Image (cartoon, rainbow, N blue to C red):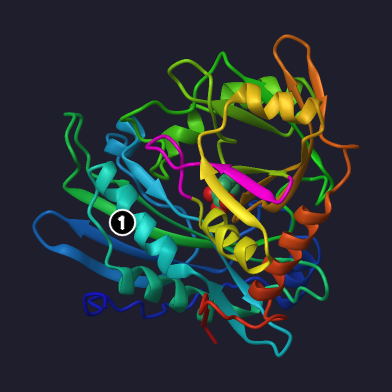
Amino acid sequence: MFPPMTLNFDVRPNPQPRSAQDRAAILADPGFGTRFTDHMAVATWTAADGWHDSAVVPYGPFTLDPAAAMLHYAQGVFEGLKAYRHPDGSIWFFRAEANALRFQRSARRLGLPELPVEDFLESLQALVRADHAWVPDPAGGEASLYLRPYMFASEAFLGVRAAHHVTYAAIASPAGAYFASGVKPVSIWITTKYSRAGAGGTGSAKCGGNYASSLLAQEEAARNNCAQVLFADAGRHEFVEELGGMNIWFVRGDELVTPGLTDSILEGVTRSSILTLATRMGLRPVERSVGLTELLEGISDRSITEVFACGTAAVITPIGRFADESGRDYTVGDGSVGQTTSALRQALLDVQFGRAEDTEGWLTKVC
Ligand code: COI
């Protein structure tokens, strides 16, 4: 199905791995995105030689020329996926091919070389096998090992063109809940002042620029006690797009609605999994354009009973409240976690953690 594997990710073991005691302390309270494992996967691409120099090496800093194009023109893309420990101790990826394919789409949009799917998967397999002790035992919770593959222009060149020297790397970070509040409903700040991405731009690619453009609005959200920002279309700010790092859904009657994909919305792997799970659970998932007014009126008149965010990091996070720049406040239902949100969340986690049958063939065994 995919081109043959071309890269080997042999392991050069870290001579100074963390002690088992340090690791256990980190795994006991991993938080999100601040602690990293002992190794990383790396590979280099050059216009002349293609992909080469691949390995799993000790985790550590890069040496980067100050003129590296990534630092100036942000030519870089990334992915996010997780490795899950199952009750028998084995370790599994969830829909990693979908991330590999999106990594290719993102790379194309940013003028970067595509990493073959098999190489993407092998880099992560080799990294997780080397750092298998870092995959948390969920023990009834939902901790996992978050994987962050990424690629950036490492050519030292200040002219504006696609780089001829590119670095690929994948790092791993034990992860608990993305939001400090855990799975409690979060508040969302609606901005019509700032946009995340526009038509024809890079919104559907997973590139740092989309996240950088969300940060000022994110700070405004934090000042207003909100955890995330809801972005609307950049044209007239009429249609709901996404939360910057997550897709959004709402429940109205038996319909489960999410904004249809455009070139300014990231196609989430969790979003796509919910489309399938919802159908299996007898719900009617609908992808269509959603007016901001429709969302807020539906919350106000209680025809929208639940709203939630989804993403690899966020899993499924209930949204209890929206607030906006004009001082309006909208509580979803009674502000607590809805039944559909809980059921979908449970169904997804049960598959990921091997507690339910993987009827869709979404899991791949690592070790
Ligand atoms: C993910 O969910 O994996 C992301 O990349 C989003 C980011 C907010 C952590």
User: Taken as a whole, is the magenta stretch helix, strand or loop?
Assistant: loop
**Residue that badge 1 annotates:** 104
Residue 257 inside the magenta-drawn segment: yes
User: In the image, is residue 125 above or below residue 29?
Assistant: below
Look at 51% across and 34% down and name the residue there. 289
* Residue 180 located left or right of residue 11: right
Pick the quarter of the image with the N terminus.
bottom left
Does any portion of residue 297 appear in the rendered image? yes
Q: Amino acid at mark 1?
A: Gln
Q: Position of residue 166 (x, y in %)?
A: 26, 51
289, 20: nearer the viewer: 289
The residue lying toward the viewer, choosing from 139 and 296, is: 296
- In magenta stretch: residue 272: no
Q: Position of residue 18 (x, y in %)?
A: 65, 70
Residue interval drawn in magenta: 253-267
Which picture quadrant has residue 30?
A: bottom right
Kindly give the residue lying farthest to the top in the view shown. Answer: 326
Expressed as whole percent of the image width and height from the top left, the position of residue 54 reads 30, 70
Q: Is residue 15 visible?
A: no
Residue drawn 74% across and 54% down? 177
Identify the residue at horizontal 50%, vertical 22% (top origin).
Answer: 195
Give the structural element (helix, strand or loop) at label 1: helix
